[in-house]
């Protein structure tokens, strides 16, 4: 099974900050990596697929990068509505799915 | 609009069973594989089941294999998850999600239901 390790597990930031979250796969997964945002009491929302492609309707301050085993989600100019938990997810051995442990972005 | 509306769940005794439903609308349900994902209280996301667009194949992680069963009725555009032999650790919010392919290769869960809660307790 492919394991996904996200870091940090939580971080504190202020509005306007640049935030970076990383996800590491236990084996090479090309760019079969997605990112989701989840707010309390809500379902996850797809932000980025194929490591760097922005889902329709997602603000351009969100970006993704990486390939192989190391991936990054970056939020530029953090907005109040961006305080949430973020998950990476691998879809390398379709349809098997693995999620990272999540990163909670909190207000500093 | 494209949406998934969930129902079912509730409080179930250990060893009991429950069926969750996920009604799809706004898209051609029979063209898409579907997942179930759960989230235990205060925990992360855990994948629990997948069914192909036509119901021909089903996949589960070891944690629920043999106890959970996913099914679908394309004529009713509805997805189901049957949870059997429930344990306290199955207590979670259960989400259904559409599995979409982008650029022919890259799969992602692009539409999610609102979630339904299952609590396993005596």
Image (spheres, rainbow, N blue to C red):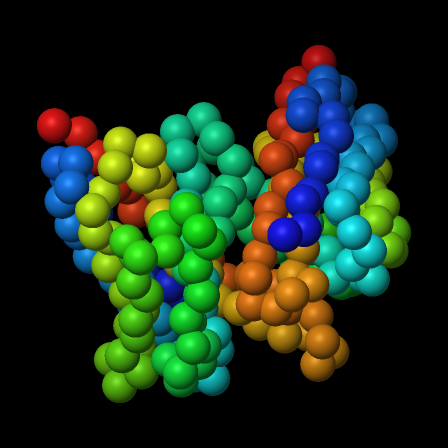
Residue B106 point in image, percent of width and height: 70, 70
Q: In this view, does A87 lie to the left or right of B119?
A: right
- Between B119 and A65, the one lying in front of the other is B119
Q: Is residue A17 visible?
A: yes
Residue B9 point in image, percent of width and height: 21, 47
- Between B41 and B66, the one lying in front of the other is B66
Residue at the location (86% across, 55% down)?
A: A68
Name above or below for residue B56 compared with residue A98: below
- Between B28 and B120, the one lying in front of the other is B120
Q: In this view, does A65 lie to the left or right of A84?
A: right
Instruction: Kindly indicate the quadrant of the structure image that contains residue A42.
Output: top left
Residue at the location (52% across, 36% down)?
A: B44
Residue at the location (82% across, 56% down)?
A: A28
Q: In which quarter of the image is the C terminus of chain B?
A: top left
Name above or below for residue A71 compared with residue B14: below
Name above or below for residue A25 compared with residue A94: above
Q: Quadrant of the N terminus of chain B?
A: bottom left
Residue B88 point in image, percent of width and height: 26, 32
How many marks can you see?
A: 0
Q: Is residue A55 visible?
A: no
Which residue appears farthest toward the top when viewing the image?
A108
Residue at the location (50% across, 62% down)?
A: B111
């Amino acid at each position: 099974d492919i394991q996904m390790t996200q870091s940090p597990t939580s971080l504190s930031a202020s509005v306007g900050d640049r935030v970076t979250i990383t996800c590491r796969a236990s084996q090479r997964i090309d760019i079969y990596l997605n990112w989701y945002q989840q707010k309390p009491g809500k379902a996850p929302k797809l932000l980025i697929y194929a490591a760097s492609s922005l889902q329709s309707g997602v603000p351009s301050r969100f970006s993704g990068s990486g390939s192989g085993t190391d991936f990054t989600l970056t939020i530029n100019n953090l907005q109040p509505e961006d305080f949430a938990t973020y998950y990476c997810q691998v879809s390398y051995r379709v349809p098997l799915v693995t999620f990272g442990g999540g990163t909670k972005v909190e207000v500093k | 609009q494209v949406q998934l509306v969930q129902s079912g769940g509730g409080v179930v005794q250990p060893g009991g069973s429950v069926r969750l439903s996920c009604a799809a609308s706004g898209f051609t349900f029979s063209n898409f594989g579907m997942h179930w994902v759960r989230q235990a209280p205060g925990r992360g996301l855990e994948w629990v089941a997948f069914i192909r667009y036509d119901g021909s194949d089903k996949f589960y992680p070891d944690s629920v294999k043999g106890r959970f069963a996913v099914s679908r009725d394309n004529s009713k555009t509805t997805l189901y998850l049957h949870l059997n032999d429930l344990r306290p650790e199955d207590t979670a919010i259960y989400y259904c999600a559409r599995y979409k392919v982008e650029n022919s290769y890259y799969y992602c869960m692009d539409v999610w239901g609102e979630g339904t809660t299952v609590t396993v307790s005596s």
